[in-house]
Image (cartoon, rainbow, N blue to C red):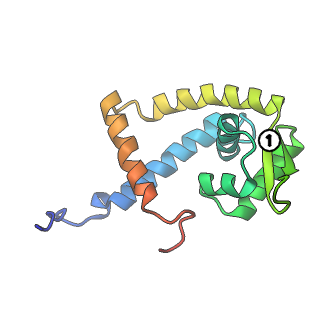
Amino acid sequence: MPTPPAIEPLTVESLLSWRLVVAGRLVRTMADANLNAQAGGAPALGALLRLADEDGISQAELARRQRVESPSMCRMVDRLEREGLVGRERDLDDRRVIRVRITRDGRAAAEAGREAVAELEERAFSALNAAERQTLAALLGRLLAGLPETGAAP
């Protein structure tokens, strides 16, 4: 199998990991600025959107899907619960499992947040056409699938 050509010269700007980190940081800054008023900010909004799509998943599964550590998700759900956006309940079959349920207010916040996220996506990725966005989404999906769930060293 032939060796792929190297990126020459090797500079910080030529590193894909550097580009990904910087792009991620800049999009995160945009998200924080634009979504701060939405249900506790971008990370909490992500959890609410997942629950709006699949209500009642376990807190552990929610953490896994959001790719955050369980204690971080616990604190986030604590905050969302205090705000009346979600509720917790024990699983009937396995009392060790805690299910997270979105409330009516949480669903309304998720829908308002979904609109704000759509606007953010449009601004953040305006330099790409629809086909390029699909390609980027597919490539990032493959990249994420190959990485450890919470960023720990493989």
Residue appearing at x 69%, y 34% in the figure = 52
Residue that appears at 14% across and 68% down: 3
Quadrant hosting residue 11: bottom left
Residue 4 placement, left or right of 91: left
Q: Which residue is mark 1?
A: 101
Mark 1: which secondary structure?
strand
Residue 41 image point, x, y percent: 69, 42
As drawn, 106 above or below 69: above
Q: Quadrant of the N terminus?
A: bottom left
- Is residue 34 toward the left or the right of residue 6 in the image? right
Quadrant of the image occupied by residue 64: bottom right
Could you tell me residue 6's position as x and y percent? Answer: 17, 65
Asked whether the viewer can see residue 123, the reply is yes
Q: Is residue 129 visible?
A: no
- The 10 Å Cα crowd at callout 1, few under 14, some 14 to 19, many 20 or more, is many
Query: Number of callouts in the render?
Result: 1
Height in image: 144 above or below 48?
Answer: below
Q: Nearer the viewer, residue 77 or 26?
A: 77
Q: Is residue 128 above or below residue 62?
A: above
Please, what is the three-letter code of the amino acid marked with disc 1? Arg
> Where is residue 20 shown, x and y percent of the image?
41, 54
**Which quadrant would residue 81 be assigned to in this image?**
top right
Residue 13 percent location from the top left of the image: 31, 58
Extreme residue in the bottom direction: 153
Residue drawn 74% across and 52% down? Answer: 58
